Amino acid sequence: MRHVIALDVGGTGMKAALVGVDTASPDGAPVLLHEARRPTGRERGPDAVVETVLGFAAELRALGAARYGAPAAAAGVAVPGIVDERAGRAVYAANLGWRDVPLRALLSERLGGVPVALGHDVRTGGLAEGRIGAGRDADRFLFVPLGTGIAGAIGIGGRIEAGAHGGAGEIGHIVVRPDGPECGCGRRGCLEAVASAAAVGRDWAAVCGDPLAGAADAAKAVASGDERARAVWQRAVDALADGLVTALTLLDPQMLIIGGGLAEAGDTLFTPLREAVRRRLTFQRLPSIVPAALGDAAGCLGAGLLARDLLSTEVTA
């Protein structure tokens, strides 16, 4: 059976799959023939992380060859940070310590010379959401996962816009609170610093006195009627709405797709967020604001789509 390798590399863990090439589910989603997870091991340093990624991919190649009679025909890998998809380089990833890693070439060499697609993790997840997830009926959408950080994927006509230098969609670094906390990028008051899941967890921990409390705990406290939690939550929602309105003013999307850890709060997030965005609009059209459909599988599914696209391009050529 023809198949490809899909690999989603995160700051703490990696998700991977073998994906069928000639088969698809009724909704068009790739068929996952095998799934696996592995810690990234970033505490061992950037070079060790690269070797872990290469080794994991090689294991998947060997498993596919043994199980399906031939090794994977291609591979797709999604990584965080700044990614130059055309050159196949992981330009910079703070969480992994990477700088200018030629990951596509290294993976292709380890996998016996097969074609490899390298993608940005959020843009790759946005590709999956656009093709087989919440945005499949939207010609233009913005996918925004709210996790440890905040980024965005701009979907236009079935593709994801990377920008001239691979930095398109970095909504998390729009400054929404100039006097706010310092962001990892060095500026103060970025959306990521005040409205990410990490930021909500930090603020709720400070208010409730539990240093281990996180965003999920804040959401539960909001749902139970805790006024302190509601204040923390609303501050984050208001900041998020400010950032999203800036983005939709520039992009005019049909749909805002919200994913990541905060989206798991369901209506606790979406009800006040929709209202906060609506209140801020003047001439702009209100897009649909919907939860992501694919959860934490989006990056891996998107990597599989990137790999399958490589084979389609080869056939067309």
Image (cartoon, grey):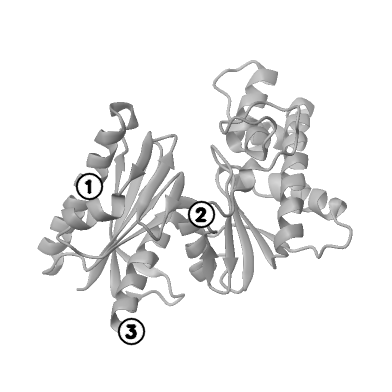
Which quadrant of the structure image shows residue 198?
A: top right
Q: Work out how far the residue at label 1 is from the one at label 3, CA to CA, in angstroms.
A: 29 Å
Please tell me which residue is depicted at 56% across the width and 39% down the height of the picture.
Answer: 149
Above/below status of 298 relative to 264: below
Tell me residue 294's x, y (percent): 49, 58
- Which numbered mark, 1 or 2, is in the foreground of this view? 2
Q: What's the amino acid at mark 2?
A: His
Q: Work out how far the residue at label 1 is from the one at label 2, CA to CA, in angstroms.
A: 26 Å
| Residue placed under numbered mark 2 in the picture | 165
| Residue placed under numbered mark 3 in the picture | 316
Give the secondary structure at mark 1.
helix
| Residue placed under numbered mark 1 in the picture | 54
Q: Can residue 265 be seen from the camera position used here?
A: no
Which quadrant of the structure image shows residue 114?
A: bottom left
- Which numbered mark, 3 or 2, is in the foreground of this view? 2
Q: What's the amino acid at mark 1?
A: Leu
Give the secondary structure at mark 3.
helix
Tell me residue 286's x, y (percent): 79, 63
- Which numbered mark, 1 or 3, is in the foreground of this view? 3
Q: Of the residues under marks 3 and 2, which one precedes in the sequence?
A: 2
Please tell me which residue is depicted at 25% across the width and 55% down the height of the picture.
Answer: 105
Determine crowd level at label 1: few under 14, some 14-19, many 20+ residues with C-alpha closer than 10 A: some
Determine crowd level at label 2: few under 14, some 14-19, many 20+ residues with C-alpha closer than 10 A: few
Tell me residue 243's x, y (percent): 72, 46
